Image: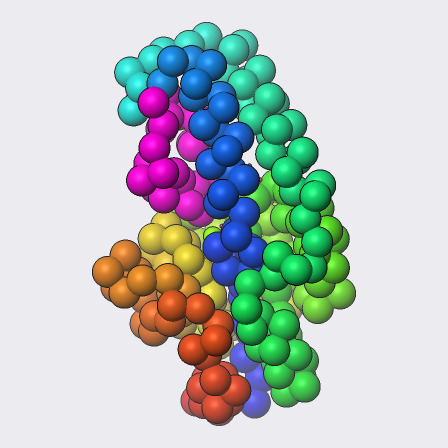
Amino acid sequence: NKKGFIFDLDGVIVDTAKYHFKAWQKLAQGLDINFTEEENEQLKGVSRVRSLEKILAWGNKTISQELFNELMGKKNEEYLGYIAEMDKSEILPDVPRVLNFLKEQKQPISLGSASKNARTILERVNIMSDFNAIVDGNDVTKAKPDPEVFLIAAKQINIKPEDCIVFEDSVAGVEAANTANMISIGIGSKEVLGHAKYVFNDFTEISDDFIKSLIEN
Ligand code: B16
Ligand code: MG
């Protein structure tokens, strides 16, 4: 039996939300906007452009397109500074075990991330070679909750959408997986990700037997 296993990046493989938060907070401060950790939660899985639009809306600010573009560049520069310091110790618990088990079981593995920095991060934490395909923010025209990123990922590993399993930490991402007709597995809290088919707090709760049952069903 062959299934396709699609992993989101931020919040599933690594916790880069904390670096996005630092970078957005610095930018918000410069605009005199108070940006909170709760608001940052709502930016999970959301594209860079959409994130800045939301922060401006929360702060009741309108800016020129020129400044908008400049701020996007600055935010990313700041963020890149943080991820340059990452190493494999930042891979979240038991992610390597699950990836290894899937490889043992000869299951194709793909990345499906909104981030345009996905490849840089995978390189930093040294797990690039675990993936049969990498689909990220550079490959899509429509952001999550649109299913585009996962549909392209399925195509690249040659697996039908209904035979794909998606690991996601964001509401938008779970919605995208469901719309793509894939099996959604939420990584995080049940309250937030209640619309996922299964929810686990993290990969330590995902047993090899559970993965096996996904492969066999
Ligand atoms: P970048 P994911 C998403 O990654 C993040 O969750 C989200 O907070 C971020 O704004 C987005 O990537 C874009 O990232 O600025 O690096 O292009 O969770 O889909 O892997
Ligand atoms: Mg995510």
Q: Note whether 162 is above or below 208 in the view shown.
A: above
Q: Is residue 40 magenta?
A: yes
Residue 170 at x, y percent in the picture: 39, 53
How far across and down, in percent of the image, does residue 118 sit? 63, 48
Q: Quadrant of the N terminus?
A: bottom right
Q: Is 119 left or right of 65, judged from the image as shown?
A: right
Q: Nearer the viewer, residue 161 or 185?
A: 185
Relative to 41, say whether 55 is above or below: above
Residue 191 belongs to the span the image colors magenta: no
The colouring scheme, among rainbow, by chain, secondary structure or one colour, is: rainbow
**Which residue does the image show at 42% across and 13% down from the upper left?**
31
The residue lying at 34 percent from left, 33 percent from top is 36
Percent position of residue 92, x then y: 55, 63
**Magenta region:** 34-57
Q: Residue at x 37, y 50 (%)?
A: 172
Q: Nearer the viewer, residue 122 or 93?
A: 93
Instruction: Identify the residue at image location x=44%, y=68%.
Output: 202
